[in-house]
Amino acid sequence: MNQRQSRQRAARAVAIEQTRGVAAGLAASGLLVAALLLGLAAAGQAAAQDPRTPPASFAELAERLLPAVVNISTTQVVEGRGPGSGPELPQFPPGSPFEDFFKEFFDRHRDRDAPPRRATSLGSGFVIDADEGFIVTNNHVIQDADEITVILHDDTNLKADVVGRDPKTDIALLRIDTDRDLVEVTLGDSDGLRVGDWVLAIGNPFGLGGTVTAGIVSARARDINAGPYDDFLQTDASINRGNSGGPMFNLDGEVIGINTAIFSPSGGSVGIGFAVPANLAEPVIAQLREYGRTRRGWLGVRIQTVTDEIAESLGLDGARGALVASVTDQGPAALAGIEPGDVILVFDGQDVPEMRRLPRIVAETRIGKTVDVDVWRDGTEVTIPVTIGELEKAEETGLLSADRGPKTNSDAVRSFSKLGLELSMITPALRREHDLDDRVSGVVVTDVARDSSAAEKGIRPGDVIVEVNQQEVSNPEDVATRIEDARSHNKPSVLLFINRQGDLRFVALSLEEK
């Protein structure tokens, strides 16, 4: 073998070793890739086991919960029409040949008493205590009912009695007496819900019987002007007529809402349903169970929203809290020294971020408890101790209609062209023209210029200005003085306290020319 052949053989040996090394490297890489794929698969399995993800099926959950949901049928006797209350005679041209015919027909039938008829309605509910037979539903489902029938999941019909009801939150508590084994469900923590969480609704839509629908929480804290404590959960789970009073469940099978209302131009589900949150319903149910009625805390104030302009007028750092429009004579707030114009910022250690949060906080406060109320007054924060009263007792005694009113009177007329207002004393003629109560005093608005700041804020003739910048006014000259004082201090707006037929409210009016 010559030297050239020896070099070629050595080169081939090196090449073989390099090939073996590359193959070994690729094999190792393959193992790494396989390990990575196995890791991804394990991560996928872990994600699939995350309780926040939707299950493959709601069947097991529905099977467990359906027996606790009941259908509710109510019957009401509607009185027939009395004599002379029949349909009206159609209008015909004078001398029409139909006039005498229909007159004779209607005269024959008008005084016949129509017999009473029985009207029925359907709704849903759920068993909250199997041993005692307590069932929760909506107040509007059983309101005015003469007879209430609860239909269990196995189609057993049972008569139910009303334990108590609360129109303000639209909740009612029923009770049935049966030897059958009932299935109960528990209330969950609705405050822990997040927008996007899965929910299950079960009810009796259109009288079809137990029906299960699924969806998500679409929104929280919805105010639909249904009552003073609106704090609804919104869902896209299908809810229709007959679902009212039925439960909304989380994936743990806990009731986190009571289905109450839908938004629907057509009358059917369009994916916008509302439920009373469980955390709002729970104390109401407990009170109905214990007392047969609600016993809510009462502060004795009428409040309104703090807008950016109002906050600026009061020197408050941002629109927050609840502005006191009026206080009730002999109410807890009045006795403690809270005044119109105060802004309630903190109640019993709980911040009041917006006006509509305060009623619920007060309602859930124990009656007779003395709490600290932090208010914004004259540019400083003041703490006032208040002993909480009972709302229902105040309603029974008529205290709620006795708001503290303004005083004074006088004589001048003045035009405020920059504000778009014409103001006058309250004369007997103006009192009659605008139907003002004899106790109302201040300065009456006689004209509002179109396209003015006052018109934009909804001020209208007949409104009575009681205060300007939290100082009482008795004539238009007083108003002018307060406005000039605000301008001299470079304030961009003035705060008017207005009485409109007993409805007291604050309005921030810009001083800048339009």
Image (spheres, rainbow, N blue to C red):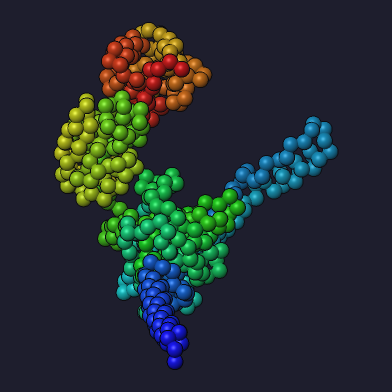
Q: Residue furthest right?
A: 97
Report x, y in % for residue 43: 38, 73
Residue drawn at 41 percent across, 61 percent down: 197
Describe residue 66's horizontal placement relative to residue 82 as left or right. left
Counting labels gives 0
Q: Residue furthest front?
A: 2
Above or below, 85 against 437 in this view is below
Above or below, 371 against 449 in this view is below
Report the quarter where the N terminus lies: bottom left
Residue 260 visible in image: no
Report x, y in % for residue 181: 37, 79
Report x, y in % for residue 435: 44, 22
Q: Quadrant of residue 354?
A: top left
From the viewer's side, name the closer residue of 205 and 377: 377
Describe residue 504's horizontal placement relative to residue 362 as left or right. right
Q: Quadrant of residue 301?
A: top left
From the viewer's side, name the closer residue of 145 and 213: 213
